Every structure is written in C-alpha cells, then in structure tokens.
Amino acid sequence: MEFSGNKTDTAQGKSSLNTSAEASGDITTSKRFQIPCCDSGDLKMPTHVAIIMDGNGRWAKKRSLPRLAGHNAGMKAMIEATRAASDWGIKYLTVYAFSTENWKRSQEEVGGIFKLLIKYVESELRELHRNNVKVNVMGDYEKIPAAALVKLKETIETTSNNTGLNLNIALNYGSRAEIIRGIRSLVQKSLQELRELEISEKNDSELKARLEEIITEGSFSRELYTGDELGNIPDPDLIIRTSGEERLSNFLLWQAAYSEFAFTPVMWPEFTREEFKKILDDYSNRDRRFGGRK
Ligand code: IPE
Ligand code: IPE
Ligand code: MG
C-alpha cells in the first residue's frame, strides 16, 4: 500500500494546504484545504471524520460469498479510506470496526473478523508507520481475542509518536458502555474530592455547589474514550454510514451532538476514495450553526 503523504514527503504533501493552517499546524473546520489527490479545488475539510463501516455481509451475500469474504473486502476498504484521509490531511479518522453488540454474531464470524484484523494490521503496519499515521484503539478492547490484542498493542506502541493522521479503531466499542464507564469514574473522583474537602453528605447546598463544579460537560467528556485517554479528540464533524442504514447503532452518542451526517447506499467494501470525496464535497457546502445565527 502506498500513501502519498508519507514521512519523507510531508513537506510536499503540506504544500498543497493553505498557508495559515500550514504555519500553525491547526487544521480546523473553518479553514479551506485542497485535496491533493483529486484536484477538487477548494474544500472545507472536517477535522474529524467518523465512519460506520456497514454492509460487509450484504455485499458478500449478493455475490454468494461467505460473510467473511465481505469482512475481508471491508478491511481493504478501511485501508483505502485511511490512505485517502492521510493523503488529504484529515487529522482524525475514527472507524467503527466492532461494536459491543457484535458479539451476538456466530463464533465463526467474530473469530474471523479478529483474524482478519491481525492479518491486515500485520501487512499494513509498516506502511502506516512510514506514513506517520498514529493508530489508537477505542473501546473495551482488552476483551478482544488475545492474539489480536497483542498485535494492536504493538501497533499502538510503534506508531505512538507519529504526528500525521490519527486513526482511531473502535473495537468492542459501545457508546452507552462508554458513558456509564465515564459516569462511574467521575462519581469516584467526585467522592474522593468531597472527602478531601471534608464536605458532609448532610450539607446539601455545599454538596450541590461542589458537584456543579466537579461534574461539567467538559469534565465528563474527558472521561470518555475520546477524552484524556486519547488526548481529547475533538467531536466528529462528520459521521458517514454506508449500506443505506440511517442510524448510529450505539456509536459516539455524546460526541455526535453537532456532527453532520452522511448516509450512502454504497456497501462498505465498495466505498471508494471517489465516494469519500463526494461526501466531503457535500460536507463542505453545509452550513453549521451550532445553535447560533449567522
Ligand atoms: C459491518 O458489516 C461490519 C461489522 C459490523 C463488524 P456487517 O457485517 O454488519 O454487514 P451487514 O450489515 O450484515 O450487511
Ligand atoms: C454497526 O453495524 C457496527 C459496526 C459497523 C461495527 P451493525 O451492522 O452492527 O449495526 P446494526 O445491527 O445494523 O444496527
Ligand atoms: Mg451491519
């Protein structure tokens, strides 16, 4: 696999970005970028794109292939999407690879998905690293099969100092579980702090005032996988779902508060760079108001 924005030609890759962002290294949604690959002209690029990679099974079924052939083709599409995001200077790409609910599938399918993951992480690691991609995993991923866990930890470690695209692979990820985990942690920290301040449980008004200080949208966000653990990733600007389904399926429920959505009927294994670019084109024309007025 070849990426064009690799470590050795970063300067060349960057030269296609507009100067102010280049100087500050700040890629924000308000800046305008050119996509080097597709000479698309001026595009307002998202900082963080999240993808619900759906449709592997239906893609395989339509071709009378086993479901795992669909997952294999899906891995290739994931690599291609990563390559495109890296080439285009997108800062964060989060891909939903395995949900907390996907364990309901047959052992054969679940085992096969993790074997494929090992295979592709092994074959792509060198290229990812060479292209300055930093790989993170988000979710309760300690519970995934041991061989996959070892490979992923190695990948995270190897790429930990890279400064290009942040590729976040959501594995055994569920947003509700993430939220509950965050609440537990914040409650624990709150109790600790209240103890240190020696505030009595009976002092209702003092308790309320302290809790309002301790538990905020900001402090809660930092408890999520996307928070302190992964360096406080900005909320996704754009969430893409393939295969014609139009739902979140327990993905980034908190973080998606002001995300733009793009739904495409294309099955994930057929998601190409061109399809990705079409969606980015559409995104660049959207008017994001965040509840305010223009
Ligand atoms: C998405 O493809 C991959 C995972 C959920 C692991 P699916 O396997 O859900 O494909 P469909 O929805 O059955 O077509
Ligand atoms: C969402 O797809 C999870 C992933 C893409 C990993 P699913 O195929 O599991 O979602 P539902 O069951 O159609 O909602
Ligand atoms: Mg599906």
Image (cartoon, rainbow, N blue to C red):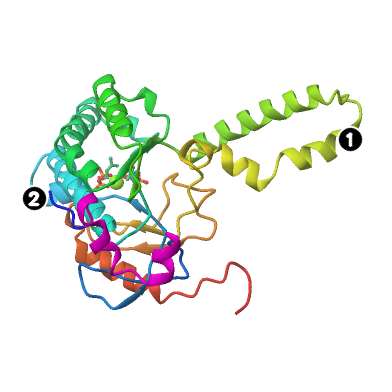
The span picked out in magenta is: 5-25
The residue wearing badge 2 is 63
- Label pair 2/1, CB-CB below 8 angstroms: no
Residue 65 magenta: no
- Residue depicted at x 62% and y 41%: 220
Between 274 and 136, the residue placed more toward the observer is 136
Is there any visible trace of residue 57 in the rendered image?
no
- Residue depicted at x 21% and y 56%: 9
Q: Residues within 10 Å of mark 1 (few under 14, many from 20)?
A: some
- Decide whether the magenta segment is chiefly helix, strand or loop: helix
Between 110 and 82, the residue placed more toward the observer is 82
Q: In the rendered image, which quarter is residue 181 located in?
A: top right
Label 1 sits on a secondary structure element that is helix
For the C terminus, the quadrant is bottom right
Residue 265, horizontal then vertical, whole percent: 26, 62
Image side of residue 287 versus residue 36, left or right: right
Q: In the rendered image, which quarter is residue 107 located in?
A: top left
Image position of 114 with respect to 259: above or below: above
Q: Which amino acid does label 1 sit on?
A: Glu
Mark 2 and mark 1: Cα distance apart in space: 65 Å
Instruction: Mark 2 or mark 1: name the one nearer the start of the chain.
Output: 2
Q: What residue type is labelled 2?
A: Arg
Q: Which numbered circle lies on residue 121?
A: none
Label 2 sits on a secondary structure element that is loop
